[in-house]
Image (spheres, rainbow, N blue to C red):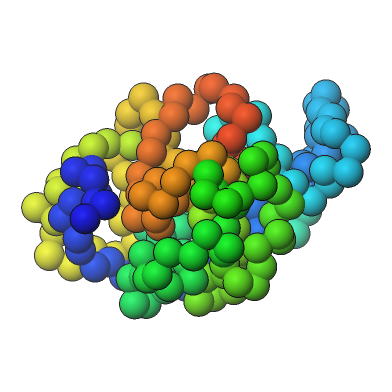
Amino acid sequence: SFAQPDEQPPHKVLVTEFWIGKFGVTNAQYASFARAAGIDFSFREGCERHPVVRIAFDEARSFCDWLGQLNKRAIRLPTEAEWEKAARGADGRIYPWGNAWNPAALNSGIGGAGDIAPVDRHAPLGDSPYGASDLSGNVWEWIADWYSPTTFADRVANDDFIVDPGGPASGTHRVLKGGCHYLRQSATRSARRFRYAPAMRCYDIGFRVVVELG
């Protein structure tokens, strides 16, 4: 009953195996990148384990490139399909932990912290089937795909069996997933889609990384 028009129609996709960060990138982790890159970056004392926020899309992508060079791996932002797979598992669950709403499993506007919380605050209760934490609530996460309200409708119309789908070839906004700390039940569902201009920095948007295998 919560489904929005841009989430329609429901469809299955095949996603090639990948690794995704257990947590979103933290202030402490981003600070290591900032020092290496000579970027001015600071955060409040005691917030080392909080997700980094106020990071534009290209800055998040630069972090991925830097981390990939350090580890000699292809590291990038997740596609929307990868993110949903990590959050929803093979059974298409509504929330990372299952189909029943549980305000104790995430940092949301219902019984949450009232502000951004550490990335491991709700682990393992709110973890996905694959052990990924903090995919629901706390902060939105940047997704590699361009946003379109008709992404899924166009995808289903053009292909009966979809492997490793991405978003449109171009656009004005990037996809965000996961909801954030002041939102309620509907907006923290794993299927919920939002959008934001990639050049903008916002206090409730962070990101996590994907490692390509092979």
Is the residue 27 above or below the residue 210 in the image?
Answer: above
Is the residue 157 above or below the residue 115 in the image?
Answer: below
Is the residue 31 above or below the residue 188 in the image?
Answer: above
Q: Which residue sits furthest left? A: 157
Q: Where on the picture, by quarter, is residue 115?
A: top right
Q: Nearer the viewer, residue 133 or 12?
A: 133
The residue sitting at 66% across, 59% down in the picture is 23
Residue 176 in the image, given as x and y percentages of width and height: 45, 41
The residue sitting at 64% across, 41% down in the picture is 114
Q: Quadrant of the C terminus?
A: bottom right
Q: Is residue 39 left or right of residue 151?
A: right
Q: Nearer the viewer, residue 102 or 67?
A: 102
Say whether residue 140 is visible: no
Task: Please tell me how many numbered marks the rendered image carries.
Answer: 0
Q: Is residue 108 left or right of residue 22?
A: left
Q: Is residue 18 left or right of residue 15?
A: right
Q: Quadrant of the N terminus?
A: bottom left
Residue 193 in the image, given as x and y percentages of width and height: 35, 44
Is the residue 129 above or below the residue 178 in the image?
Answer: below
Q: Where on the picture, by quarter, is residue 197?
A: top left
The residue sitting at 23% across, 45% down in the picture is 4
Q: Nearer the viewer, residue 112 or 53?
A: 112
Residue 129 in the image, given as x and y percentages of width and height: 50, 76
The residue sitting at 16% across, 55% down in the picture is 9
Q: Which residue sits furthest right? A: 45
Say whether residue 87 is visible: yes
Residue 93 in the image, given as x and y percentages of width and height: 36, 70
